[in-house]
Image (tube, grey):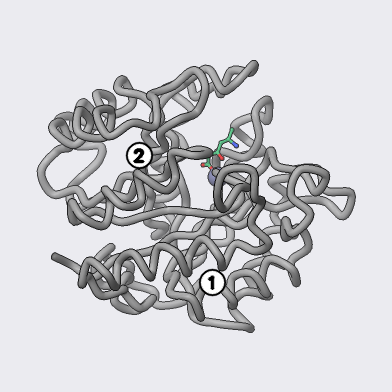
Amino acid sequence: MDPLIITVAVTGAEVIREQQPALPVSPEEIAQAAWECRQAGASIVHVHARRPDGSSTQDTEAYRAIIDAVRARCDVIVQVSTGGAVGMSADERLRPVSLRPEMATLSMGSVNFGEDVFLNAPADMKRFLDGMHARGVVPEYEIFDAGHLATLQRWVARGWIEPPGHVDFVLGVPGAMPGTPQALMYLLAQLPVGFSWTVAGIGSAQLSLSALGIALGGHVRVGFEDNIYLRRGVKATSNAQFVERVAEMSRLLERPLATPDQARQLLGLSGGITRP
Ligand code: KMH
Ligand code: ZN
């Protein structure tokens, strides 16, 4: 098996401080969290920007500040969000890609998202893909639902997406695929050849799906974006706690962790660092 890539989604767009007091919000806080998670074994940090009041933004300068702050602290791969927050326009969501980060997420379809709808029209998704390709940004294809994987397959068949590539199964969003082993196995059976994968379980699904990701040769995403509880009724006090736990599980299963540079190699990232 390849070494395990741990992604940490440190902030997200939806969680607020009132729910999780340790949520990193400012660029400095996000960089500090990224550094702690790197020490604990993470090689990718998935970032969302917030305004000083804590609200979500896709503002280019806000992302630039995060990327610069993380880069000044450690060598993790910075993956920006193009999902943003529910209700944002496609133009707004695409902004951080102009910074030419090493990676960016690309959601592969629309889905109910709790009480909201996370809208991803095919034409917007294609524009995101073209924008990433034009800037040398490696996409991580976000799969919330089975139809999203079917779309990925269709786009591979059309030649719009060329393997190798990397997907992230985000399982357990209310309204999308459940965070169950059965859902993960169903999706894995349809993963196109040449694609590696990460699994992100929402809420309590994070723990069991992390174990499966390690055991099945996939990769794992954890962090406050997806889950604020370390165990039932006990909130985590840092993102690094989640990373430490996955690292320990991986050690017990005798699967080494990928360094950021090993992750770059596995994911075909050429730049090495975020380019100016
Ligand atoms: N905040 C969600 C609506 C991503 O980062 O690419 C979408 C999301 C996906 O978080
Ligand atoms: Zn995200």
**Extreme residue in the left direction:** 193
| Snapshot quadrant of residue 130 | top left
Residue at image location 51% in from the left, 65% down from the top: 78
- Ligand 2, seen in the image, is in the quarter at top right
SS label for mark 1? helix
| Residue type for callout 2 | Phe
Query: Residue 142 location, x and y as percent?
Result: 40, 39
Query: Residue 176 location, x and y as percent?
Result: 44, 21
Mark drawn on residue 37: 1
Label 2 environment density (alpha carbons within 10 Å; few <14, some 14–19, many ≥20): many
Foreground of the two, 65 or 19: 19
Query: Residue 179 location, x and y as percent?
Result: 39, 32
Residue holding disc 2: 169
- Quadrant, the N terminus: bottom left
How far apart marks 2 and 1 lie (CA) works out to 21 Å
- Quadrant, the C terminus: bottom right
